[in-house]
Amino acid sequence: MTGAFVEVAPPRPRGEAAPSAARPSPALRLVRAAPPYLYLAPGLVLLVVWTYWPLTQTFYLSFHSWNLVPTSPMTPVGTDNYERLLTTPALADSVGRTFQVILGLLPFTVVVPLVVNLLARGVGGRMGAVYRGVVFAPMLVAPVAGAAAWMFLLDPGAGMVNAVLGTDVNWLNSTATAQWAIIVITGWHLVGFAVLVVAAGLAGIDSEYTAAARVDGASPGQITRWITLPLLSPTLAFLALMTVLLSAQWTFPLIDTLTQGGPAGSTTTIHYLLWEYGFRSHDAGLTAAAGMIFFVGFMLPAIPLARLADRTTREEGR
Amino acid sequence: MRLRRTAGHVALGLLGLACLFPIYWLYAASLRAPGDVHDQSPLPWPLSLENYADAFAKNDVAEMLLNTVTVAVLTALGQLLVALLAAYGMAAWRFRGHRLAHLMFVGIWLVPFQVTMLPNYALLARLGLLETLAGVIVPMSCSALGVLLLREHLMNFPKELLDAAKMDGRSSWATLWTVVVPVLRPVLAALGVLLFINAWNEYFWPAMVLQRSNAVIQLGLRSFMGTEGNDWGPLMATAGLASLPVLALYLFLQRHIVDAFVRSGLR
């Protein structure tokens, strides 16, 4: 059961067991079983201390009132925090805006990559490599640096965007446009990554299928509709789910640096609301309750995604 | 066919232009002479490094960059080490709880930072790690992506090599460092670059641990952006410096970096 290939001296031996000839003593069995656990220990300890235990603490906190000051007491308040959340419009508004961001990003992470890849199937070789290299670059630009670059482009006084469009819009400071600006900037960061993921998915489709369909007299449009798209659908599903996760990761720095959730709360997504509750209002109970609601909602897309990702890393190892 | 190829070039070319232009404009503005920042001419001329000098003089950019390098390198190395040990433990032995351990690593993808941030913050405060670089690095040193990726590579590791090491009477620890690591070196290098880039660009976690201090470049840039009446030249120079190391890495390792990101996507 243990020691598949080695059973000598674990790195940090626990307990002193003298090797006995006949039946291994319990202590020796312990030493022999220890190595895998010792190797796993650093990783698992980090996970428990920084993720899983805090998750239970958040659950506990969500039924208490506390202001984040270590010396001040936590008082149990029952389901008060949840009731407060559900009766103020802030949570529902922020959830709505989060959906808006995710929907707004889908053209960048699914539609444009799909269309561009279908158009560009004939483009290969050196030019293809150059295009791929260029479109991927924004994914590597730090989000805050991307924010700075776009703040400059969108500047109401001297920005390139207003100069080109001949407009005079204060893009980041008007409730009508701020949310769209955040979506476009996030989309700019992610679109190249999505293009390459779709390209990898297309490359993985066996060309024998399309060749066979062509022999049978199918038109290019029919081949795309009935062969390529169905075979590509797992990739597209992966990207759609990925958008949910990436949107959190990439919009937060943009919102925090460009709009701070404003103007008039028009860019406050659930991620930013949690941050404000926690570190601006110092209302730990309310933050924890909102966090738990967010966590449950987040699981819905995240579970299939985690399974897909788990499977992808498995295939990658082969 | 020819028409199709042209359409492909046009589509990719336009997208490439849209992707590249903001980056180009950022560096172009940073290289203009201070008076010309609002110039809309496509080429920055005359070139000037004055904005960079300004950024270094006003903003402690040198210290921020040094801190960011420290954080990104140590985070990536810590994640590599922890992931290597855990993956080795999972791949080389059969043991009770194997499945549970695997699920625990996959499971952290289900828990967003925002959900656990308050307890994390309280723990950091109790450990005295708030507003320290160690507080940014240590809690981040377990990467699920790293563990799962290395585990799969180790699962397919040639068993003969491990058996030979066992015959030689080597300990599992010696086998890891003298047999496994040399063979896995390319995989470890690619993963290391990916983890470095992620750590360099990370924003949420440093913002939480360091709060209002500007120890790393991403946060320094934020405080620079917040000041009234933007000083665009030095701001663009600082933003350029904040992305320069990763873009430079990308210039040399393009194919490897793209592969690593596309195959893993998640962190």
Image (cartoon, coloured by chain):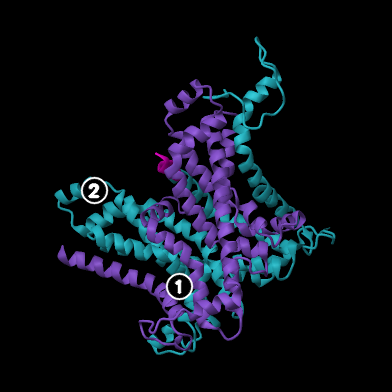
Chain colours: A cyan, B purple
Magenta-colored stretch includes residue B149: no
**Chain of the residue displaying label 2:** A
* Res. B143 in view: no
What's drawn in magenta, residue-wise? A313-318
Q: Dot 1 surroundings within 10 Å: few (below 14), some, or many (20 or more)?
A: some
Q: Earlier in the sequence, mark 2 or mark 1?
A: 1
Picture quadrant where residue A275 is located = bottom right
- The residue that label 2 is drawn on is A207
Q: Amino acid at mark 2?
A: Ser
Residue B197 placement, left or right of B104: left
Closer to us: A294 or B69: B69
Q: Is residue A112 above or below residue B84?
A: below
Closer to us: A167 or B69: B69
Q: Is residue A199 above or below residue B84?
A: below
Q: Is residue A74 above or below residue B219?
A: above
Q: What numbered label is drawn on residue A184?
A: 1
**Are the two marked residues, 2 and 1, in contact with CB atoms closer than 8 angstroms?**
no
Percent position (x, y) of residue B49? 46, 78
Q: Amino acid at mark 1?
A: Val
